[in-house]
Amino acid sequence: MTKRSMTAAWSEDLATGVAALDEQHQALFRCVVELEQAAGERTMLSTCHALAQLSRYAREHFAEEERLMREHGYPGIELHIAEHRDFSHRLFELRRAYLDQDISSELITLLRAWLRFHVTTTDMDYVPYLRDIGHTLAEVVECRAAAR
């Protein structure tokens, strides 16, 4: 992973201030960087793996975000979920299209732009709901893990 790609993917203006979310968002951006690298190498196996990894991680992250929003009564949940579904659909189409063609730099740019926009707008809208609950997201995750 080049320093330039990582810088282009993640910056401090994307930080929500909720450590667990920031770590998940950084991981999503790393997945896009890995996809960009695999597409640049033009190896089908690497690109398919990177697409599958991005899809899986996005699905897990979105499920966790949606659970937290439901749990804390975030009023903008429906629009937020619609954005998640749109991104997931785009990823599905991208994976399907890849079987027929190469992934272009325009598609990488689209994925990166969507993530940047989503984190800086839609995700930032619900962060205050998590901060106002009287405990940190890390405590919520630890409590949930302990209950398993």
Image (tube, rainbow, N blue to C red):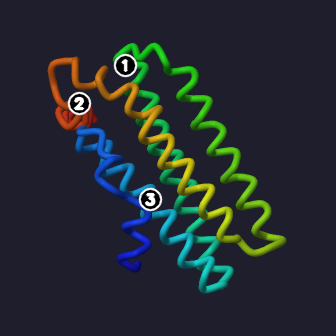
Q: Is residue 39 visible?
A: yes
Q: Are marks 2 and 3 in contact (CB under 8 Å)?
A: no
Instruction: Tell me the amino acid under the disc marked 3.
Output: Phe
Write down the residue under mark 3: 29
| Residue drawn at point x = 62 percent, y = 29 percent | 82
Compared with residue 79, is residue 85 higher up or lower down, i.e. above or below? below
**Disc 1, SS:** helix
> Which callout, 3 or 1, points at the residue further toward the start of the chain?
3
What whole-number distance in Å separates the C-alpha atoms at marks 2 and 3?
24 Å
Q: Are marks 2 and 1 in contact (CB under 8 Å)?
A: yes
Instruction: Tell me the amino acid under the disc marked 2.
Output: Val
Q: Residues within 10 Å of mark 2 (few under 14, many from 20)?
A: few
Task: Tell me the quarter of the image containing the C terminus.
Answer: top left
Q: Residues within 10 Å of mark 3 (few under 14, many from 20)?
A: many
Task: Tell me the quarter of the image containing the N terminus.
Answer: bottom left
| Residue drawn at point x = 49 percent, y = 18 percent | 76
Instruction: Tell me the quarter of the picture where residue 35 sits.
Output: bottom right
Of badges 3 and 1, nearer the viewer stands 3
Write down the residue under mark 2: 140
Instruction: Tell me the quarter of the picture where residue 48 sits.
Output: bottom right
Instruction: Tell me the quarter of the picture where residue 45 sits.
Output: bottom right
Residue closer to the observer: 133 or 124: 124
Q: What percent of the width, then of the height, locates residue 122?
A: 47, 32
| Residue drawn at point x = 38 percent, y = 32 percent | 124
Write down the residue under mark 1: 71
| Residue drawn at point x = 37 percent, y = 19 percent | 71
> Which callout, 2 or 1, points at the residue further toward the start of the chain?
1
> Which callout, 2 or 3, points at the residue further toward the start of the chain?
3
Instruction: Tell me the amino acid under the disc marked 1.
Output: Glu
Q: What percent of the width, then of the height, locates residue 8?
A: 43, 65
